[in-house]
Amino acid sequence: RKTPNCYYGREGQVLVHLFSWKWPDIAREYRPWWERYQPVSYKLDSASGSRDEFIDMVNRCKAAGVQIYIDAVINHMAGIDAGTGLGSGGSYYNTQLRFDGVPYGPDDFNTRCTTGSGNIENYADEGQVRNCRLVGLLDLEGGKNSVRSKIADYFDDMLQIGIDGYRIDAAKHMWPEDINATLSMTGVTEDKVEAFVYQEVIENGNEPVKTSQYTHIGRLVEFQYGYKMGDIFKWQHIKLSSLHNFGSDWSMMPSGDALVSIDNHDNQRGHGAGGNVITHKQPEGYKLAVIFMLSWPYGIPRVMSSYDFDQDWTGPPAQSPADGESCGSSWICEHSRGSASFIAFNREGGELNMNLPTGLPGGTYCDVISGDLLNGVCTGKTVTVFSDSTANIRIGSDSSTPVVAIHIGAKA
Ligand code: LAG
Ligand code: CA
């Protein structure tokens, strides 16, 4: 009666008096964000909600014309230090390689790792990168049919619910043929073409794992894109005007293979390979980078939507922003809407004042950066496009958002 029944290894820790808290908020508290990358089953009950809530979300998004791509963690399960317990969906696991909720047993894990620690020790060794444990995460043997079919069942379940594709987490740590074989085992449902696939492979300099080893499977995240955007919009090491051929000429993969983003949940915190990315913490440059990405024809853009954090591990705020409410101080919500047909930037230090071809028909357009077209009235600047489709564009260098964007859907 005098010991607080803490988990093994956690004895002597403190108690917290959570006065009047709601149960779901308590359940969500003190969970580092990266726990999501330590699955113990493929059940859909998690800190984000129940299976029914997930299904309802997918259906409502589909009804609104929005596709859902899931973040599929299939390289590994929980970390070697995760001990024994029940996942948030109630499945039993232990680090003697039992994950009853799938189920996986000891035979489903990698036995081909040759390092002393069992972890990846040297990224110059392609075998280690694929066969050993990434930061101690128990590595699945993707070469085995038993593993492939369990993952394929999970994917089929997701397709049945109505999702449209997958981000393949830690694809760098899986053999390309294992990913491909697993995907080939999943069904294509009646009403749709094959699932969209984008793989997380951070290609670093001289390392042997290359994104080109995966392009026959699906798209890949082109990490160089975000790093270059950091060089340009954060550090201003590269002049904006040099972007005229931004794309595969800049040692990036072909546009049709790429998915791009300015930052992601890892590199905005210095995780993953880090990199000099720009984030919401530098809002002026960040807005420009996002606008550039959305308007530049390279890859498929993915816009980030974050919450604020002070410590690396800080989990999300307990409450999501309510319907119709704009994002508050804890949710950043960098994502924006609308499609611009002509866009101009100025990052050269002086005023831009030029007649530029816009490609748009003549008329008065509302600049959707400084305002919006509301009930036929432009709340921001207007831009006149002449009958030859040119427009006089003036952007001062002192403006906090030195961008003008106009599109056909916002003619004033
Ligand atoms: C990813 N992409 O390929 C994710 O984007 C990235 O967020 C994942 O790492 C990683 N692969 C594995 O899915 C994240 C954190 C890690 C965290 C890991 C597992 O960046 O820091 O590791 O998820 O939760 C954590 C601790 C480690 C510990 C490990 C195992 O930070 O120190 O060794 O858990 O207990
Ligand atoms: Ca692996």
Image (cartoon, grey):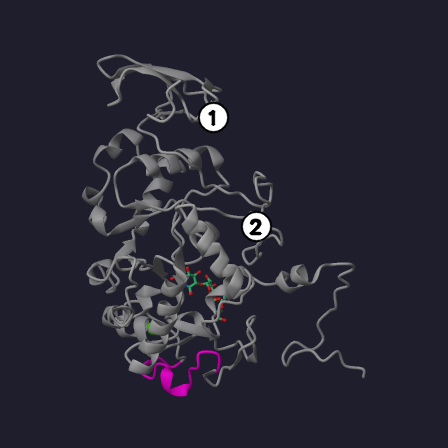
Residues rendered magenta in the picture: 100-116
Please say if 284 is above or below 49.
above
Of the pair 307 and 348, the residue shown nearer to us: 307
Q: Which amino acid does label 1 sit on?
A: Ser
Q: Distance between the residues labelled 1 and 2?
A: 24 Å
Find residue 132 and report its horizontal and vertical position in percent.
Answer: 35, 76
Q: Does the magenta stretch include residue 396?
A: no
**Residue 398 located left or right of residue 168:** right
Q: Earlier in the sequence, mark 1 or mark 2?
A: 2
Where does label 2 land, which residue? 309
Of the pair 292 and 270, the residue shown nearer to us: 292
Where does label 1 land, which residue? 400
Task: Find numbered disc 1 in the image and state the secondary structure of the residue it sits on.
Answer: loop
Dominant SS in magenta? loop
Residue at left offset 44%, top offset 57%: 271
Residue at left offset 55%, top offset 73%: 87
Q: Residues within 10 Å of mark 2 (few under 14, many from 20)?
A: some
Find residue 175 and report its horizontal and vertical position in percent.
Answer: 26, 71
Q: Which amino acid does label 2 sit on?
A: Phe
